[in-house]
């Protein structure tokens, strides 16, 4: 009885050392890190989407504002928020690409609207719009930080996945490489949109 218990303890210790040495624990840590970073990306994108109804209410108060520009923002928001997101999306490159495309469309539509606003001094001077602009700029910066953190987390995980001998552990336990933002997205990520309004006279 004592020998069997001793054997179990020794076996458990050996298994623990083996799994730790082959990167098993690192996979667990980096997988959780990636999920956490992805959750923050989603959180910041949702924050941006939640700002749009306020923008809509403000802009619709400007009687002659170009409705087509606002409509494109609303449609892009609807498309972006209709995509089902989950932590597992990072294991599905096609789903990630679809998500990125929808968020890219929304970002572009918002950027175009902010450019159009330059032609409406009264709207630019509106305090509610100025408050929105500050909140929007802050949110875009948070998105930039969150995406960069996510890219780094995925990179660390994927390096572990491809390196020897941890790639053997990955094969045994079925750890696949994770999808990230594409190269063209990464280039855009490094420069968040600047929203600057001159002083009102």
Image: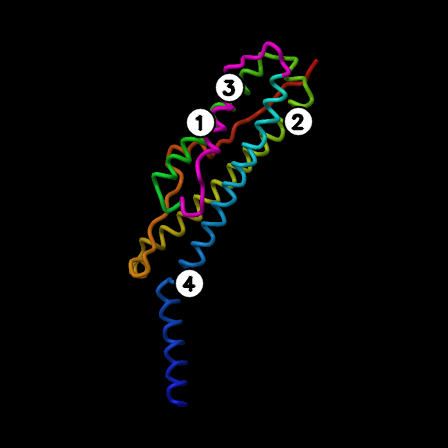
Tell me what residue is drawn at x 34 percent, y 49 percent. 177
In space, the residues marked 3 and 1 are separated at their CA atoms by 13 Å
Q: Name the residue nearer the viewer: 54 or 145.
A: 54
Callout 2 secondary element: helix
Whether the magenta-drawn stretch holds residue 78 is answered as yes
In space, the residues marked 4 and 1 are separated at their CA atoms by 38 Å
Which numbered disc, 3 or 4, marks the residue closer to the eye?
A: 3
Quadrant assignment for the C terminus: top right
Quadrant assignment for the N terminus: bottom left
In space, the residues marked 2 and 3 are separated at their CA atoms by 21 Å
In space, the residues marked 1 and 2 are separated at their CA atoms by 23 Å
Q: What secondary structure prevails in the magenta region?
A: helix
Numbered badge on residue 71:
3
Dot 4 or dot 2: first in sequence order is 4
10 Å crowding of disc 1: few (<14), some (14-19), many (20+): some
In space, the residues marked 3 and 4 are separated at their CA atoms by 49 Å
Q: Name the residue nearer the viewer: 47 or 57.
A: 57
Dot 2 or dot 3: first in sequence order is 3
Which numbered disc, 1 or 2, marks the residue closer to the eye?
A: 1
Dot 3 or dot 1: first in sequence order is 3
Callout 3 secondary element: helix
For disc 4, the marked residue is: 25
Callout 1 secondary element: helix
For disc 1, the marked residue is: 105
Callout 4 secondary element: helix
Tell me what residue is drawn at x 37 percent, y 44 percent. 179
For disc 2, the marked residue is: 131
Q: Name the residue nearer the viewer: 144 or 107.
A: 107
Indicate how the structure is coloured in the image. rainbow
Tell me what residue is drawn at x 40 percent, y 58 percent. 27
In space, the residues marked 4 and 2 are separated at their CA atoms by 46 Å
Say whether residue 57 is left or right of residue 182: right
């Amino acid at each position: 009885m004592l020998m069997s218990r001793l054997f179990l303890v020794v076996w458990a210790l050996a298994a623990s050392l083996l799994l730790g040495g082959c990167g098993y624990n690192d996979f667990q840590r980096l997988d959780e890190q990636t999920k956490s970073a992805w959750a923050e990306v989603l959180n910041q994108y949702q924050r941006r989407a939640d700002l749009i109804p306020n923008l809509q209410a403000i802009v619709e108060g400007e009687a002659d504002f170009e409705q087509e520009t606002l409509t494109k923002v609303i449609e892009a928001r609807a498309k972006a928020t209709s995509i089902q997101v989950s932590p597992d999306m990072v294991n599905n490159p096609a789903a990630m690409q679809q998500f990125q495309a929808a968020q890219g469309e929304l970002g572009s539509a918002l950027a175009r609207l902010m450019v159009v606003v330059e032609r409406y001094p009264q709207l630019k001077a509106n305090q509610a719009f100025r408050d929105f602009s500050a909140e929007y700029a802050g949110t875009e910066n948070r998105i930039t930080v969150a995406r960069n953190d996510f890219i780094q987390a995925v990179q660390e995980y994927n390096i572990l996945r491809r390196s020897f001998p941890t790639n053997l552990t990955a094969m045994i336990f079925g750890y696949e490489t994770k999808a990230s933002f594409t190269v063209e997205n990464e280039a855009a990520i490094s420069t968040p949109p600047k929203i600057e309004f001159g002083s009102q006279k």
